[in-house]
Amino acid sequence: MKKWVADKLICPQCLDAEIALNLTVREADAEDVLDGEMTCPQCGSIYPIQQGIAVLLPEKTRIILNDHRGYNAPGMLSAYLWSHFGDLLKDPDATQAYQVWSAGFTPTAGDALDVGCAVGRLSFDLAATHDHVIGLDTSIAFIRKAREILTRKEISFDLIVEGHITEPRTHRFNESHDFSRVDFIVADALALPFRTRAFATTAAINLLEKVPDPLKHLTEINRVLRDRSAMFLFSDPFSWDETVSPPERWLSGNGNAQYSARGIDTMRRIFAGEFGVFDPPLGIADDGNVAWKIRKTENLWEHITSQYLVGRRE
Ligand SMILES: C[S@@+](CC[C@H](N)C(=O)[O-])C[C@H]1O[C@@H](n2cnc3c(N)ncnc32)[C@H](O)[C@@H]1O
């Protein structure tokens, strides 16, 4: 964990009280705390830092660390590394998705937060225009890889072709890239370990449908987003899944007359201040569809249309 991150963190169990954490360092280098822990002086919770990875999960989410399926499964690394960095790897099948999503980033005085960052592509893109960028995800496998990319300035992995047949893929970032202002932590979108109004920019790409409580996730985005000069980049395919969130919590497609028939229309209303989530509301500066692909094997692809809104507070 980069040393500058420590001052920005609060206890995810005591969010209302915004309790700063006490840092104990056991091993460090010039930039990073490699081994140590952070302790909450109010509730006593301990948040470990091991091999440079800080885990800021509230107690009820920590079980995910021991789950080697889902986003921690080995095949997911190949799939997401290709999806995030396929264009940099000059793969002819790569999409331009991240270039579309990051087109609205402009030089901004302040920090950015990439919620559900996976292996980190959008966080690296945000670094070009923000003071500091923090990417967070509940998948420790993704965060470990994102931190490896940032420390080595190199993307290197085995792309799955078929079964255990793989091909090496490598991309080296130019030395002039400054990654010292980017970091990645394990944390939960439903309990963001940051102070109220801490970020100029927040992004949540393809995350809404992946959390058990979508409205709570948006309420957390509102809490940490500045009330002026702020931007929220939102994108989602609205492919709700009963194994992730109960249908009564979906923001469309569940017959709830409160919501619009389509998720993107409910989101426009939520941005405008309906349902008491965004206060102050967000004006919509841009919207559209992004074509995105996940490559699982040479012959297995997921084609996704992700609908995005760029919300701004002046
Ligand atoms: C569909 S992927 C999208 C990842 C990335 N934003 C992108 O566009 O490629 C969803 C990501 O959200 C993460 N995730 C799921 N639930 C989460 C939560 N409660 N808090 C933080 N991240 C979560 C997953 O581990 C996964 O990396």
Image (tube, grey):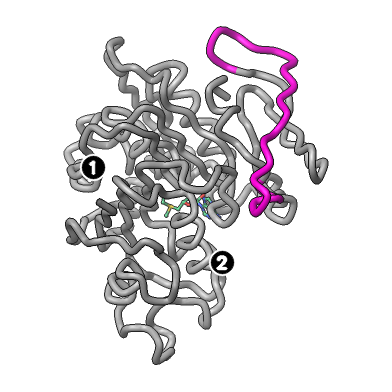
Q: Nearer the viewer, residue 237 or 29?
A: 29
Q: Could you tell me which residue is drawn at 72 percent across and 51 percent down?
A: 63
Can see residue 252? Answer: yes
Assign a secondary structure to mark 1.
helix
Can see residue 116? Answer: no
Magenta stretch, residue numbers: 12-32
Magenta-colored stretch includes residue 121: no
Q: Quadrant of residue 154?
A: top left
Q: Residue furthest right?
A: 44
State whether residue 201 is above or below residue 310.
above
Question: How many other residues sit within 10 Å of disc 1, few (<14), some (14-19) or many (≥20)?
Answer: some
Of the 4 image quadrants, the one containing the N terminus is top right
Q: Amino acid at mark 1?
A: Ser
| C-alpha separation, residue under disc 2 versus residue under disc 1 | 27 Å
Residue underneath mark 2: 212
Q: Could you tell me which residue is drawn at 51 percent across and 77 percent down?
A: 249
Q: Amino acid at mark 2?
A: Pro
Assign a secondary structure to mark 2.
loop
The x and y percentages for residue 264 are 29, 71
Q: Could you tell me which residue is drawn at 32 percent across and 66 percent down?
A: 271
Q: Nearer the viewer, residue 173 or 16?
A: 16
User: For this view, does 66 lie left or right of residue 278?
Assistant: right
Asked whether mark 2 lies closer than 8 Å to ligand 1, one says yes
Q: Residue furthest top?
A: 30
Residue underneath mark 1: 102
Question: How many other residues sit within 10 Å of disc 2, few (<14), some (14-19) or many (≥20)?
Answer: some
State whether residue 24 is above or below residue 212.
above
State whether residue 144 is above or below residue 274.
above
